[in-house]
Image (cartoon, helix red, strand yellow):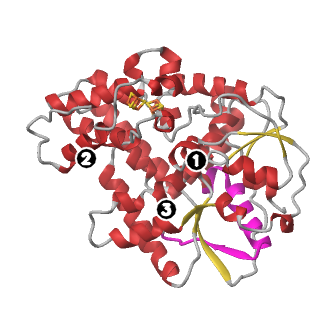
Amino acid sequence: MHLDLHPDFKGTSQGEQARHLLSACVHCGFCLATCPTYLDNRDERDSPRGRIYLIKQLLETGQASARTHTHLDRCLGCRSCETTCPSGMQYGQLLDLGRELMEHRAPRPATQTGGRWLLRRAIANRRLFSSALRLGQLLRPLLPRFLRDQIPPRVHPGALPTRVHARKMLLLEGCVQSAATPLTNAAARRVFDRLGISLVAAPRAGCCGALNHHMAAHPDALQDIRRNIDAWWPAIEAGAEAIVTTATGCGSMLADYGRLLAADEAYADRARRVSELARDAAQVLLDEDLEALGAAARERVAVHTPCSLQHALQQPQLITGLLTRAGFELVPAPDSHLCCGSAGSYSILQPALAKRLRQRKLEALETNAPELIATANVGCQLHLQAGASVPVVHWLQLLDPA
Ligand code: SF4
Ligand code: SF4
């Protein structure tokens, strides 16, 4: 695709990056068939190709309207289109770039900007999010059903291991996950302990930066990334084997740290090292002796592989492969490539569309009557659980010796 840059973008790093990215697209439209938003409304502007044209138009004219915001906001960022594209289009990078330009070229109404700022602050700040969640959990019995379903009940994570092993890995506890689904990281600590590995959290590490990054707040995202690198670096220098993530959305963000800080002389090398060390918990377990876990495989399980795992990290079989090896009976679910509608803050900002996508996903997951649905990302877990007729768990809970 040829790009005739507007003078404002000529010679800028964003303009040159966009030219490079857009040159891969050959307009073929293959990506339309696997785009959840296009399948929902059949509007070309809500397809990958349509959004690529909207971003191109912005880069060529220097102008954009509120309609462009609408169609870019409706994009899940699921990157299913990247998996389908025969031409190697890196749509996710173009979307991030387009969204950032849009915030400057077509400012949102003040109420929308303020709402998005509040949302980013409330979710990414672990203490603030925990307090808000606790309040919601206290009021839960008094709330109407549709609101109650959005708030996960309070659960006790159980006893944590106290042994200290010679093998050590860092654990990214995350922002939402540690408060909303505390069983996941507790299960990870117990499973790894059983395998002779201590998972250690760095207290100063926090949100991986994905929330800010995907909401076009790039300077804030870079601040998150630098803070995490600083927090992890002493343990990395002391020989931590890996940085383990238990939410695939965070894992795909860590994999990008090296690229995002490539131009930052002070952090580039360390950011690249962090990306090299980042591992989803399932990737680590695949190299270990799973029999040592003695997991009791009783239930029929349907697996929902998050988009961040199958399209961003390109590991579509990771969870199914691991659970099969651990002895679980997995039931097939059609359209496994399609997003469930969670997509970070998407289910809050685009509730109607997110709900339709969830409905479609749950129909597929429940086709073969599973007793449980297992997934690998906190956002998908909470979003699916709000509409599912069976429990939705993190796969680590299935292997948890507790
Ligand atoms: S499949 Fe790839 S090359 Fe074809 S229109 Fe979509 S992004 Fe462009
Ligand atoms: S990222 Fe997902 S929703 Fe967005 S254009 Fe690609 S396939 Fe469609």
Name the residue beneath numbered marker 2: 17
**Rendering quarter of residue 329:** top right
Element at badge 3?
loop
Q: Please indicate whether residue 366 sits to the left or right of residue 383 in the image.
A: right
> Of the residues tagged 3 and 2, which is closer to the observer?
2
| Residue 109 visible in the current orientation | no
- Residue toward you, 399 or 209: 399
Dot placed on the residue nearer the N-terminal end, 1 or 2:
2
Element at badge 1?
helix
> Of the residues tagged 1 and 3, which is closer to the observer?
1
| Residue 343 locus on image (x, y percent) | 52, 38
Dot placed on the residue nearer the N-terminal end, 3 or 2:
2
Q: Is residue 93 magenta?
A: no
Query: Looking at numbered disc 2 in the image, what kind of residue is underneath it?
Result: Gln
**Rendering quarter of residue 4:** top left
Query: Looking at numbered disc 1 in the image, what kind of residue is underneath it?
Result: Leu
Picture quarter with the C terminus: bottom right
| Residue 127 locus on image (x, y percent) | 52, 58
Q: Is residue 147 above or below residue 117?
A: above
Q: Callout 1 environment at 10 Å: few (<14), some (14 to 19), or many (20+)?
A: many
Name the residue beneath numbered marker 3: 206
- Residue toward you, 298 or 220: 298
| Residue 357 visible in the current orientation | yes
